[in-house]
Image (cartoon, rainbow, N blue to C red):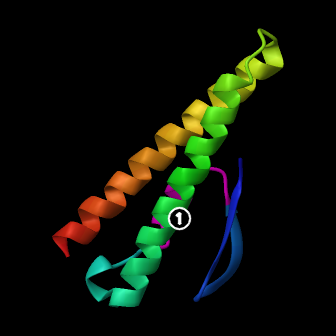
Amino acid sequence: MPTTKAHDDAGAQTFTHPEGLELRVRDLTKLSPSQADRLRKEASHLLTQAQQEFHDALFGRNGSEESFERYASARSELDSAEDWALRVAKALHRV
């Protein structure tokens, strides 16, 4: 599930996984409170989206190869979103 985000310093970019957004944060010590809040909100939004997609894929399984692929993709996306949200939380906590 690709994610498109617009950033102040660049045009809209599409990332397959949330880790792509992490590259946009160069120096966390220079973040303003509003930028840190926006980063937290993005992490929360991505995590919520991934959880919803995983839930839909989990309960939509019908034994077909297509439903298994959807489930596997959703599980991978959720793992990535969880990892990225934890990295953001730890990084902002240190700042």
Please state if 65 lies on the left or on the right of 17 as rendered: right
Q: Residue at the location (41% across, 69% down)?
A: 40
Residue that appears at 78% across and 13% down: 62
Magenta extent: 15-24
Q: Residue 28: name its quadrant.
A: bottom left
Residue 48, position in %: x, y?
A: 54, 52
Q: Amino acid at mark 1?
A: Leu
Residue extending furthest toward the left? 94
* Quarter where residue 61 is shown: top right
Q: Is residue 71 left or right of residue 66?
A: left
Judge whether 80 appears above or below 55 on screen.
Answer: below
The spot of residue 50 in percent (x, y) is 58, 46
Vertical placement of 47 versus 69: above or below? below
Q: Residues within 10 Å of mark 1 (few under 14, many from 20)?
A: many
Quarter where residue 32 is shown: bottom left
Asked if the magenta segment contains residue 18, the reply would be: yes
Rendered location of residue 66, percent (x, y): 82, 20
66 horizontally vs 80: left or right: right
Q: Residue furthest front?
A: 59
50 vs 23, nearest the viewer: 50
Depicted 30 relative to depicted 22: above or below: below
Residue 37 highlighted magenta (yes or no): no
Indicate the secondary structure of the residue bearing disc 1. helix
**Vertically, is 5 above or below 49?**
below
Q: Give the labeled residue for mark 1.
A: 21
